[in-house]
Amino acid sequence: MTFKAYSPEWAQAYKDEINRSAVYKQAAAGWEGSVGLVVLAEPDKNVPEDLGIFMDLWHGEARDVRITSRDEAEKADFVISGPYSRWKQVSKKELDATKGIMLGQLKLRGDFPTIVRYTKASQEMTECTTRVPVEWPDE
């Protein structure tokens, strides 16, 4: 089954994939806090408005992953934002999220050293996205 990018069904499949990952469970064992991903609109790529992904992550478990408004995602403990095309690059493993933050291609609100400490968990979350079949709005 293929999921529309950033649909509630995609979010559920992504959450399930994270929770199946032994690598993530170990790499994020000490993580406490929510992460908001803000996907900025790119109307020319069929993404007409900003959207958010709110992730409640706790000690190696994704307790919740849901599609929200940008405002809701920005209430998370850590917020990473970037244009749709940049997030698509992350999802396709063309860009490492931590490297994207360091290069200014993604913006972080939150404690960067904490994010760096959990780079392996972040990379495994990206691996999890690659295991969820997705239909991109601009393809």
Image (cartoon, rainbow, N blue to C red):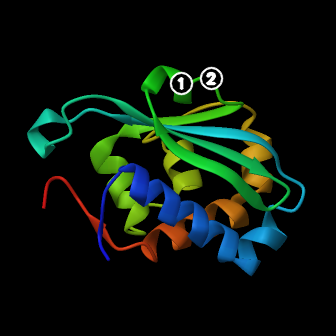
Residue at the right extreme of this rendering: 30
Badge 1 is on which residue?
Answer: 72
Of the residues shown, which amino acid type is indicated by label 2?
A: Lys
Quadrant in which residue 139 is drawn: bottom left
Q: Report the residue at 74% width, 77% height from top.
A: 23
Q: How many residues crowd mark 2 within 10 Å: few (<14), some (14–19), many (20+)?
A: few
Q: Report the residue at 28% width, 48% height from top.
A: 85
Quote the CA–CA distance across marks 1 and 2: 5 Å
- Residues at marks 1 and 2 touching, judged by CB atoms closer than 8 Å: yes
Q: Quadrant of the N terminus?
A: bottom left
User: For the residue labelled by badge 2, is the local secondary structure a helix, a strand or a loop?
Assistant: loop
In this rendering, position of residue 122 left or right of residue 90: right
Q: Report the residue at 71% width, 39% height from top.
A: 34
Badge 2 is on which residue?
Answer: 75
In this rendering, position of residue 42 left or right of residue 14: left
Image x and y of residue 117, in percent: 80, 54
Q: Report the residue at 79% width, 70% height from top.
A: 25
Image x and y of residue 92, in percent: 37, 68
In this rendering, position of residue 134 left or right of residue 106: left
Residue at the left extreme of this rendering: 44
Of the residues shown, which amino acid type is indicated by label 1?
A: Glu
Q: How many residues crowd mark 1 within 10 Å: few (<14), some (14–19), many (20+)?
A: some
Q: Nearer the viewer, residue 113 or 68?
A: 68
User: For the residue labelled by badge 1, is the local secondary structure a helix, a strand or a loop?
Assistant: helix
